Amino acid sequence: MHLPSPDRYETMQYRRCGRSGLMLPAVSLGLWHNFGGVDTLENSREMICGAFDLGITHFDLANNYGPPPGSAEETFGKVFADDLRAHRDELVISSKAGYLMWPGPYGEWGSRKNLVASLDQSLKRMGLGYVDIFYHHRPDPDTPLEETMGALDFIVRSGRALYVGISSYQPDDTRKAAAMLRDLGTPCLIHQPSYSMVNRWVEKGLLETLGDEGIGCIPFSILAQGLLTNKYLNGIPEDSRAAKPHGFLKRETITEQRVAMVGKLNAMAEARGQTLAQMAIAWVLRHPQSTSALMGASSLSQIQDAVGALANLEFDAEELARIDEVTA
């Protein structure tokens, strides 16, 4: 049984999620990579427990995280049962459904059947009675939005989740989804979009929409799968995501042009007294809509470094203009 640090709440910042009563840590830990069945359980345990020691109370999963799909939830379930069960009420645990999870017509997308069945499976894998947040993982072009939002409302009313959210929805569909959930009496708590210094799509209306609707924002891929770190400045390390056959960051994407861009950003971060990862995290947190920055990690030291970003979250106009210029 892990004994959490007694001062775990003294240095972490907590932010209100939209217009809800829920507070999230400014840095949250996502289990998309490095927590699956192909990874080492002891390293996963060290990261999860070490993150909690730093005041990270929010752990984000999805039904298909691994590989293989489902194994990240199983890993979290083992660590939770052995180390964190006594602290369940201090934790915010989320999961999602929408991407392919099992064969046949009901194993993905946004039908009521898929979402409810998927969450039931997730709860079994994690050994939980409920999740704190459950997301629809991606928009479904074929299922009526009313059905998907109705399923999320049912999931809350049935006690399977306390809050619901959406991920990767465009601004117009976000407004429609928020209105439907509000009418049902289960407000949309949070939106999880990809967002980083090299991926700006949320700035084209989504951030404004979330502010108008009172919905929190928790960006993922904030380090662009590790590109926005100093890891690739001198080649591709063998233990990096770009070197793994199942990673989303491919070797061929680490071009000379991108390395040069990262080098310029790294110099800016050093001038701020930060690592590049810390500057990238601070950059996404600068928006008032950003409740939390959702980071991935392969080691506890990376999580410790990320939390260090909170020491300097301010940017002046010149810095922001230079980042825009470098990443254009």
Image (tube, helix red, strand yellow):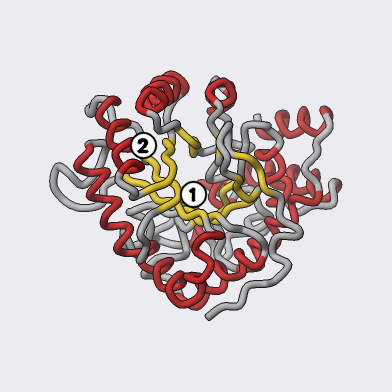
Give the amino acid type for the residue marked by disc 2 in the picture: Arg
Q: Residue at x 35, y 27 (%)?
A: 184
**Percent position (x, y) of residue 48?**
54, 67
Reading the image, the residue beneath label 1 is 252
Reading the image, the residue beneath label 2 is 138
Give the amino acid type for the residue marked by disc 1 in the picture: Glu
In this view of the protein, which residue sits in the foreground, 320 or 217? 217
**Residue lying furthest bottom:** 1
Does dot 2 land on a helix, a strand or a loop?
A: loop
One can see residue 20 in this view: yes
Quick one: label 1, few (<14), some, or many (20+) residues within 10 Å? few
**Percent position (x, y) of residue 38?**
38, 70
**Percent position (x, y) of residue 212?**
57, 20
Q: Nearer the viewer, mark 2 or mark 1?
A: 2
Q: Are marks 2 and 1 in contact (CB under 8 Å)?
A: no
One can see residue 255 in this view: no
Q: Residue at x 80, y 43 (%)?
A: 268
For residue 39, above or below residue 64: below
**Percent position (x, y) of residue 226?**
58, 53
Q: Earlier in the sequence, mark 2 or mark 1?
A: 2
Q: Residue at x 47, y 64 (%)?
A: 34
Quick one: label 2, few (<14), some, or many (20+) residues within 10 Å? some
